[in-house]
Amino acid sequence: MKKNGGGLLGDIRVMAVILCVFAALVVIYVYPPPPADAGINGNLRYGLDLVGGSSLQLKLEGTLVKINTTSANESEVVEFLEEELDTEVTPYKDDGGAVYEIRKSVTKEQLSEVLRGINADIAKKPNGEDFFEDSITRATRDETRRIIETKINMLGLASTTIRTVGDNLMIIDLAGIDIRTARDMVGKPGKFEIRIQTNGTEGDIAKGQRLEEIENITAHVMYGSEGIESVGTTPTSEIRKWQGEEFEEWGAPFALTENGATALRDSAVEFDAINNPENHQLAMLLDDEVVYSAPIADEACKNLEEGVIYRWTANTGPEEEGRKKARELIIHLKAGALPVNVDIIGSGEVPAYLGAKFKNGALIAGLLALISVTGVVFLRYREPKIVLPMFFALFSEVILILGFAALIHWQLDLPSIAGIIAVIGTGVDQLVIITDEVLSGGRSSTKMYRKRIDFAFGIIFVSATTTIVAMSAIAFMALGTLRGFAIVIIVGLLFGVFITRPAYARVIETIV
């Protein structure tokens, strides 16, 4: 075989592998800086089955129904159902008219009995079945997920995954959290408090500060449970002008009770916030952490001099960033209360010591798999100059997968480790195909060598494509923990086909 000049380090395929592996190691161990106690784990994150923790399977309670009535309009139906069922009812439109989302679980018999009060009944679907589903809208499901994620993030729990199945099922994995704490986090609303700055200057209160940091310069105004009557479901916007240019200012709307509005006005007057709002900001805290701080608007200060204000909007800024902050503040204003009740239909806990054993076992299994396939390949070829490049190609794929996991904050669990081992197996198969094609023709011209390599890569591409298509069905259908297994295999095959396999073929071309 005729060898190409230029050297391996001058080849773009070999350099691509070296640079990608270096970048993966940087992501794992250098940037962002890993926790001080991370050790060899670096920025890698592990699921509860490798470090211990709890898992909750939740059913979000709700009912979707379409109603036939000639005696009441849509708003009257909503008002009637809210009073009779003692829960929030939200209508939305579909192709066939209004569908009502009842934010609690009711039976068909119970609802039919209630609807007799307005001479109404449950509508039929085109197939003749009742339009009655034990479910909720996707928007309500997503809102519930955002609230749970916000509560978890405020507690600093990074090793958490939330998966949704259908419209009303949710699986939450909380690594390092015992089952009792996990239940409390999901089921209990947070404590929301509004305080007013009593001394200091503008900027002394910032988002993220704890109550103990601002307690001496603020005074209590109200708790959300006693002072907030309602919170808007979506951010509102208003066109404002600044230096001759118009922009869209976003905000979170909410309404106060009589006691809440009175307490806010009295505090604003007592601490002179109506005359000096910049240095007497309103601070909002969720579970004793500041989530919002801003002065009272000038127009509101003038109105407070005359009386109480019941409806407020907490301005959060312009453009998309302002809208995002407004949506987050709406969740905080609701004090972490979920829009629907949740029923814990299943739970599990992995003790920390058992998770550590699983983690060590998974590491040993991965190393044994890598060493074992290398040993089998050595028995096949009896050539260290072939086996060593093959070993480093497989090892590079593992590093690349781990780097990808660290980059996207993917949690490694037992199925993910199984996926890495499966990638090692499929990887060595493809490397053997390349090696056999190179060796089968003996020494030959570069043109013949290229033909054999092209033939080998044809087989590899077909094999990888069929596997990726099969794994995609699992990855995109969110089939529980199997999703991690499928994603790791897909990522590993892509790294192999486009990065490590071409480099290995170049190395084999040079050394054989």
Image (cartoon, rainbow, N blue to C red):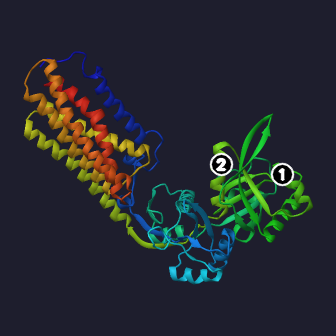
Q: Could you say whether the residue bearing mark 2 is in a helix, strand or loop?
A: helix
- Write down the residue under mark 1: 277
Q: Write the residue at 67% across / 61% down.
A: 333
- Using the image as rendered, state which of residue 342 and residue 284 is in the foreground: 342
Toward which corner of the image does residue 47 lie, by quadrant? bottom left
Alpha-carbon span between mark 1 and mark 2? 24 Å
Above or below 313: residue 105: below
Quick one: which residue is furthest to the right in this view? 306
> Residue 226, image x and y in percent?
73, 71
- Check residue 444 in the rendering and tell me which mark sits there, or answer none: none
Above or below 151: residue 180: below
> Residue 419, image x and y in percent?
28, 51
* Front tag of 1 and 2: 2
Q: Could you say whether the residue bearing mark 1 is in a helix, strand or loop?
A: helix
Residue 436 shown left or right of residue 471 in the figure: left
Q: Write the residue at 38% across / 42% down.
A: 404
Q: Amino acid at mark 2?
A: Arg
Residue 396 visible in rendering: no
- Write down the residue under mark 2: 323
Residue 105 shown left or right of residue 432 in the figure: right
> Residue 307, image x and y in percent?
89, 63
Disc nearer the start of the sequence (1/2):
1
